[in-house]
Amino acid sequence: MPLTDKLLKFLYAASRQNLIYSIYEKHLMKEITQFPFPQHIGIILDGNRRWSRIKDMDKVIGHQMGADIAEEMLNWIYDLGIKITTVYVLSNENLGRDPNELENIYSLLEEKLESLYNDNRIHKKRIRIKSIGEFNKIPENLQKILRKLEDRTEKYDNMYLNIAIAYGGQRELIDAIRKIATSVKEEKIKVEDIDEKVIEANLYTSHLPQAEPDLILRTSGEKRLSGFLLWQSAYSELVFVDIFWPEFRKIDLMRAIRTFQKRARRYGK
């Protein structure tokens, strides 16, 4: 078969696949818009390195693909109108990885955050961006761009994007306890005044109108939270998908929302 015929056949197959995807996406959108959306979605971005191994590629490629998908995901969030999104990018434990791998991850984060800083949609949609985690454990350049984003969007309250970097759920609780202990020591509050609201006011997510995720989604097939939003996730609905993060698509997010919509939330009752 001539090369031109092969190319035409390939292009036809790709075009047909894109058409089928587009039809299915529209069907999903029609289906999920009939029911309330989750107000707060937490997403654990997992599987970059395993995707690279399966594809026999350098893990740098996996992280690059994952960063590109995370950037694209923001478009989906805009389109769907999700009010609050918290993404788990880098855990405290991840900081123990190979220094060269970490340097690559930090470089990708800087690149994507700089792009986000210059994205007019952030201001048009009034999206507040905040990092949660141990800020002092990440490189100064990364701290700088995060500060710029936080300062520039501090007054926005239409949508929220939280970026968990150098984050650990246990560390968040320890930091909250230390703040409360200091307040008790300084006689700002009494021990008997400590309740759920006091604890929540001292968590990293205290700036949010709803700190508790309605839905937490994790890619890669792993079925655990790995310390993600330990306090806030008490009654979150959990969805685990058998897709590595670099292959995550808008329809996968929409399917997770559909799964959430079909569940009956009982809040322990």
Image (cartoon, grey):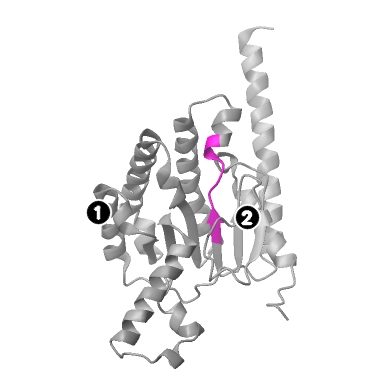
Q: Would residue 195 be found to the left or right of residue 25 on screen?
A: left
Q: Residue 249, image x and y in percent? A: 60, 45
**Quarter of the picture holding the C terminus:** bottom right
User: Pointer 1: what residue?
Assistant: 144
Residue 106, by quadrant, is top left
Q: Which residues are the magenta region?
A: 42-49
The secondary element bearing badge 1 is classed as helix
Tell which of 206 and 188 is nearer to you: 188
Q: Which of 202 and 16 is in front in this view?
A: 202
Residue located 25% across and 48% down the image: 141
What residue is rendered at 32% in x and 72% in y?
155
Q: Which of 234 and 250 is in front in this view?
A: 234
- Which of the two residues, 149 or 189, is positioned nearer the viewer here? 189
The residue drawn where x is 69% and y is 7% is 1
The reply to whether the magenta stretch includes residue 159 is no
Q: Which mark is residue 224?
A: 2
Left or right, residue 251 beside residue 179: right
**Element under label 2?**
loop
Residue 120: quarter of image: bottom left
Image vertical order of residue 151 relative to residue 69, above or below: below
Name the residue located 52 percent from the left edge and 65 percent from the top edge.
229
Q: State how far apart marks 1 and 2 are (Cα).
A: 32 Å
